[in-house]
Every structure is written in C-alpha cells, then in structure tokens.
Amino acid sequence: MYEIDAKDVYYRKLNETIRDAIRNHKRDLIVDNVCGQYYIGCGISEPDITITINGVPGNDLGAFMNGPKIVVHDNAQDGVGNTMNGGTIIVHGSVGDVLAYSMRGGSIYVEKDAGYRACIHMKAYKDMNPTVVIGGCSGAFMGEYMAGGTLILLGLTQSKEKPLTGHYLATGMHGGAIFIRGKLNEDMLWSEAETVEPSKEDIKSISKNVKEFCKIFKIDYNRVMDEGFVKVQPKTSRPYGDLYIPGP
Amino acid sequence: MELSKDISGCGVAGFINTDGSLISGIDIVDSITLMKDRGNGLGAGFAAYGIYPDFKDFYALHIMYDNEQARKITEEYLDRKLHIEQHGGMPTRPIKKKRPIFFVYFVKPREQSTKVESEEFRTDEEDEFIVKLVMYINEKIDGAFVVSSGKNMGVFKGVGFPDEIANFFRVDEYKAFCWTAHNRFPTNTPGWWGGAHPFSLLGWSVVHNGEISSYGANKRYLEMYEYKCTQKTDTEVIAYLLDLLARRHNLPFELIAKIFSPPLWSEIKKMDDEKRNLYTTLRMIYGGALLNGPFSIIVGFRGGMLGLNDRIKLRPLVAARKGNTIFMASEESAIRYVAKNLDEVWMPEAGEPIIVKLNEEAYKKVYG
C-alpha cells in the first residue's frame, strides 16, 4: 500500500507522482484528498495496479487507460473512462456527463447516477467489448452514437422526481446493446432504435455483470434481478446508411 | 506563469446565502481558481451582491477608462445627468501589466433629469434612465465602459487569471451574500478587459461557459429595444435579454428559462394542449431571444441567483446545497473545495433553471 496526499497538488504533478510510484513497483496506490485533478490513471498500461481515490477526481478519469483498476470513494466528474481500452473503474457515487466516451474495452461500474450522454460513441472490436453498469438513473442522450459494447442501466435510485432515463435515448446508435431494468418509456427512444425482449444469451451476460456490480457495492442480487430487462438495439445493421444519400 | 492551452472551456462558479449573511470573496476565488485550467489567463471576473450596504439606495456605477481623457468626458456627462453621492478610484493592488483605470460612482437620477430636463431620457423610470445612460456611455464615449450599474452590487473583471484579477481588485476585502465568478478561455473574440465576464446591467450579471451562436439574431432583436451591443462578445446579449424580459416585460424566471432554452419542436409536439399552446406562443413571440449554441450560465440578480443550461446540455453545470447556501459550478470539485459535507449535490437537467432567492427577511435586510 502506497499513500499519496493530493491536497492542493496540481494535476500534472499528481499524475507524475502516480507514474513514478508505478515505475518504482508500487502496486496498490491510495490517493487521498483528491479534488478536481484531471486525467488520473491516464494511459497507464500495467494490469495489476489498483488506484484508490478518496475525494472527487477531475475530468477524464482513466482516459486511454489500458490495465489498472481505479476505485473512487466519492462522486466523479465528466468524461470518466474517456477512450479507455482496458481495466476497471469503480465509482462509489455518481458520475458526470459523457461517461465512457468512446470507450473501447474494460469495464466501469457506477453505484449511483450518470449525467448526460453516457456511453456516447462506445465501440467494440473483436474480443474487446467494453461493459458499463450504471446502478442509478441516467440523463438524456444515453448511448448516443453507440457503436458497440454493453450498457446496463439498473435504475435503483429511480423516484417520482428522478426518471430512469432522459430523452433521445440511443440517438444515432448503430451497434452494441443497452439493457434497461424496469419499464422504459418508449417516448424517450430515438426513431432508429427499438426495444426487444433480451435473449437467453443476453440474460446470461446481464446476470454476470449485475452479479459483479452487486458484489462490488454489496447490493442484494436477487432483489435487482427480480425485475425484468428490456434490450435497446438499432433497428437495422446500418440505420443511418441512407441519411445523406437516398437509398434504393 | 506557464500557459496550459491544451485544455479548454471556460469555468463558472457561484454561490448564494439565502439568509443574506455576508461572506468575503476568499471562497469564490478559491472555488474558481481550482478550475484555473478551464481558462487561459485572458479573462476573469467576479460579481458580488450586497457589497455596498451604506449606499444601497444608489446605483453603483463601476466604470473602466482607457485614459484620463475618457474619464474627463464621462464625468462631465455624469455630472450633467446625475446626482453623484460619492465617487472615487476603485481600490486596487499594483500589478505589472498595462491596465485600464477603474472608478466607482454612487449615483441617482435627479428629479428633473427623469422628468423635464432631459431630451434623451424622457422617462419616469429610474432603472430605464440608468440603462439609457449606460448604453450612451458604452456606445458614444470612446474609451469608457460601464462594467456594472446595479444597486448594492458590483462587478470586478479584467484580463488575467481569476486569482490575479481578484488580487488586483482586492476582492477578498468585500463582503457579499452572493458571489459569481468566471474563468475565461476566449475562442471567437478578443481577450480584453471589457470582454471579461461577468456582463452586467442594472442588477443583472451573467457568467457564461459556451458560445451563443444566435448572437447575431439576438443582437438585432435587442437593437429594436434600444440595447446597444458594444463589448465585442456574445455573452453581453444575455444580460440585456434578462433586463428586457424580466424587468421590462415582467416575465418570471421560469418562463425566461424556457425562452432561452426552449424544448425542441419534437418535444412540444408531445405535450398536452395547454402546454403546447404556451411553448408554441413563446417560440413565436420571443424567437429572437432564443439562445442557440452550447452554454451553461450563472446569473446574479437583485436578491437571487439563477443557473441554466442550453436545451441539450452541451456544457457542464453542477449544483449543491449546504444549509442556507446554494452552490453552482462547472465542476463538482470547485464546490467541494470550499464546502465540505454538502447536504445535496445534483446535476440540473438541460433547460431546467435553478432559481434561488433570498428569503423575505434577508431581502428586507439587504435592500429594504
């Protein structure tokens, strides 16, 4: 265990300190008093690192990250997991806008809510299949331009004042899958996306990820799985192929 | 100071004590300075409400002059038009770079100047008189700009990082119940002292992260109502639109928010008859006041503060509450840095205003 005090440390200095520690074979880093420092964990490739963050990390947490595990014991800001390739981010709280922006691999678990545009332009390639589980609710434009990967929204914080998800769900989506627990208001859905019953294969993937989520945040798995899921997917394999050039 | 130009996007922050208790500018400076990297040193500023309790019945004109000549002309003009209760150079600390000179005037329109004497200002309304006066100075007097003109409030702004501007204007020595702040990263327009945020007119002040792409349309709309856009940047229109819609047209903030950030037509189509009728009417009557483009703004006004995003939330805004204090900022960390153990943190929805007002007792205490 290697402790770093981030109190009033400029983000560049803090990230250098973290990199130096990893270079010196520290594997279990605890960063205290974090407040708004950008890019923590950015581009780090070593797979067996754990970075525990106490405080609110700044934008683009874990951007371009390839291997480590980041655990945040507070809320996180915008751009968590921006273009992340691998590793795990766990947030014991809520996250800001553009969660998992262009994420390409690894997994993110958010205990509570996500802001606007979660999983915008998330993509998958061969065996790289990013997975995001949001325990609470999500803002509008969730899954915007999504091209691949798996997004699971549980809505555990849902209330009368807090809807499960916002307008323009899956706008521009052309790949991947969104699984939403509970009843989805179809008015929220974009015209080129549709809801279907999840297949057996899908349920398997949901169960596996929800189990992991429940283990991390100590939530009753059976209670979560008590309610059914709907799957949101693009209507066709190329829903926007004729958008600018008239089709046949 | 090394400039970090690889990060962009302005930063905004603000808070208000709804019980009217006054606190120094130290917290707002810390809060906005935490987001230093959202600006690039080409503009920063602060608006403070409740700072002039001894002159609360007078309009406090903060005026920026490029040179002594501009000051002479402006003061002659003010002398002719107004009763000046007191005036003087604004307290500043020395800085190395070239900078304009700043004066503050506590004024009231004279009885005759609102009624008989003046040809240009044929109006009974004091507020209207001051607006016309501000427009006149900004447009006609070379090298003079009115930075703020409200009662018991003031704006401090210029070219520099927030901590530099705060130090220059001795922001730490003022006490206010509401503070807003801005950290600028100019993209389309020059970074000059008058172009820094907040933009202010009467009690209105606006700090803004984003870009008003409807600037041209808004400017032409405002010109019909004799507002002159002179400060070479988009945010100015928001301050004037607030004055037009809230003061002159007497619209509530809830409606103004829906004029600035209206729902999309596709959403209006799905509304029930009554709502659809309202939103369609607003779009028809106030189309010229619609703000297009990405923005998050924090507005200070007489007795309150308002936060608003564009209609699809293309810029960040976080709000929080601790006891009687409401905070807003571009980043949550900027709030958490100055307030531990918050009661609530939330992200407002696109186009949904957060309106915070002083409680009645506090309002009486501050303005009564």
Image (cartoon, grey):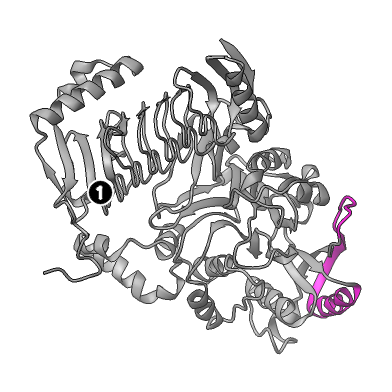
- Residue lying farthest to the top in this orientation: A1
Residue pictured at 68% horizontal, 29% vertical: A9
Describe residue B77's horizontal placement relative to residue A146 as left or right.
Answer: right
Residue pictured at 55% horizontal, 25% vertical: A55
Up-down relation of residue A110 to residue A188 (above or below): above
Disc 1 secondary structure class: loop
Describe residue B181's horizontal placement relative to residue B91 as left or right.
Answer: left
* Residue B16 in view in this figure: yes
Q: Quadrant of residue B21?
A: top right
The number of numbered badges drawn on the structure is 1
The answer to whether residue A47 is magenta is no
The image position of residue A237, as x and y in percent, is 16, 51
Residue pictured at 45% horizontal, 23% vertical: A68
Q: Which residues are magenta?
A: B68-97
The image position of residue B359, as x and y in percent, is 55, 44
Pick whichever, B192 or A157, lies toward us. Answer: B192
Chain where mark 1 sits: A
Can you identify the residue that label 1 sits on?
A: A170
The image position of residue B47, as x and y in percent, is 68, 53
Q: Amino acid at mark 1?
A: Ala
